[in-house]
Image: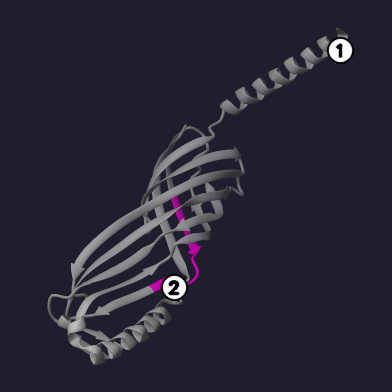
């Protein structure tokens, strides 16, 4: 019985200590939510405080823009820019204030695509021009689609004292080289000879595209937000 009574006392003491700690933690604010806008599009951040110097944040942002035009060529294209970034960040507040240093991993789904509309005009691949009638379809894309590291700094602690917040983030995603694609199909009516050189020129143009964008290994992040800490 004494052993049982001692165990109950230990459990009650541990429960009381936990309740006291929780009550003390509730005197501060540990969760905040912000709506954001910037180079990554429109999004939201959810911040959770660990202590005065450390917090974690979930972030998501995106935007899609579509346009149709010739973009300096002799045919029309349907162009689409899709922005998407989502992931988790660790925030360090070195002075226990609003200034922070951030690092984490984000899924980078940014993508740019072009789809040709060969109803007239001409296409040029590898310096050779083909009338649109010889081209059944054409498309190109540059995309990033993987988890990548993020490094940055900012202002605003979503997990600080209760109230409204203005937040800023300035950083960079280390994206690595993008994936590229350029495809075009020769219209069989153009003839086997024309289609043979056509396919070779499209392949050469694909290589040029990959070389042109291979240095795009980082994506800037600049965003501002307004939020509330609970």
Task: Please determine whether, in this image, residue 73 is positioned above or below residue 17.
Answer: below
| Circle 1 SS class | helix
Q: Is residue 122 visible?
A: no
Q: Where is the N terminus found, in terms of image quarters?
A: top right
- The residue tagged 1 is 3
Q: Residue at x 51, y 45 (%)?
A: 57
Q: Is residue 156 magenta?
A: no
Disc 2 is placed on an element classified as loop
Query: Mark 2 or mark 1, which is nearer to you?
Result: 1
Within-10-Å neighbours for mark 1: few <14, some 14–19, many 20+: few
> Is residue 50 shown above or below 71?
above
For this view, does 46 lie left or right of residue 197?
right
Judge left or right: residue 214 versus residue 78. right
User: Mark 2, residues whose alpha carbon is within 10 Å: few (<14), some, or many (≥20)?
Assistant: few
Relative depth, front residue between 33 and 107:
107
Magenta highlight: main SS: strand
Residue 164's place in the image compared with 202, above or below, is above
Across and down, in percent, residue 182 comes to 33, 76
Q: Are marks 2 and 1 in contact (CB under 8 Å)?
A: no
Label 2 belongs to which residue? 216
Q: Is residue 39 above or below residue 229?
A: below
Residue at image coords 46%, 48%: 59
Magenta span: 168-180
């Amino acid at each position: 019985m004494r052993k049982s009574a001692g165990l109950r006392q230990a459990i009650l003491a541990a429960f009381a200590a936990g309740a006291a700690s929780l009550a003390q933690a509730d005197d501060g604010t540990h969760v905040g939510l912000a709506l954001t806008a910037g180079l990554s599009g429109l999004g939201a951040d959810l911040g959770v405080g660990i202590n005065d110097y450390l917090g974690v944040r979930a972030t998501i942002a995106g935007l899609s823009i579509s346009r149709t035009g010739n973009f300096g060529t002799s045919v029309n294209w349907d162009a689409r820019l899709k922005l998407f970034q989502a992931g988790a960040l660790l925030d360090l507040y070195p002075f226990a204030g609003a200034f922070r240093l951030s690092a984490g991993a984000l899924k980078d789904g940014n993508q740019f695509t072009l789809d040709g509309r060969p109803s007239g005009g001409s296409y040029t691949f590898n310096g050779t021009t083909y009338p649109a009638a010889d081209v059944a379809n054409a498309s190109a894309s540059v995309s990033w689609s993987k988890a990548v590291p993020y490094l940055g700094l900012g202002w605003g602690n979503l997990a600080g004292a209760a109230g409204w917040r203005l937040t800023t983030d300035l950083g960079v995603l280390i994206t690595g080289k993008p994936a590229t694609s350029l495809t075009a199909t020769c219209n069989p009516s153009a003839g086997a000879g024309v289609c043979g050189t056509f396919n070779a020129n499209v392949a050469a143009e694909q290589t040029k595209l990959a070389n042109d964008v291979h240095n795009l290994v980082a994506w800037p992040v600049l965003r501002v937000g307004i939020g509330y800490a609970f």
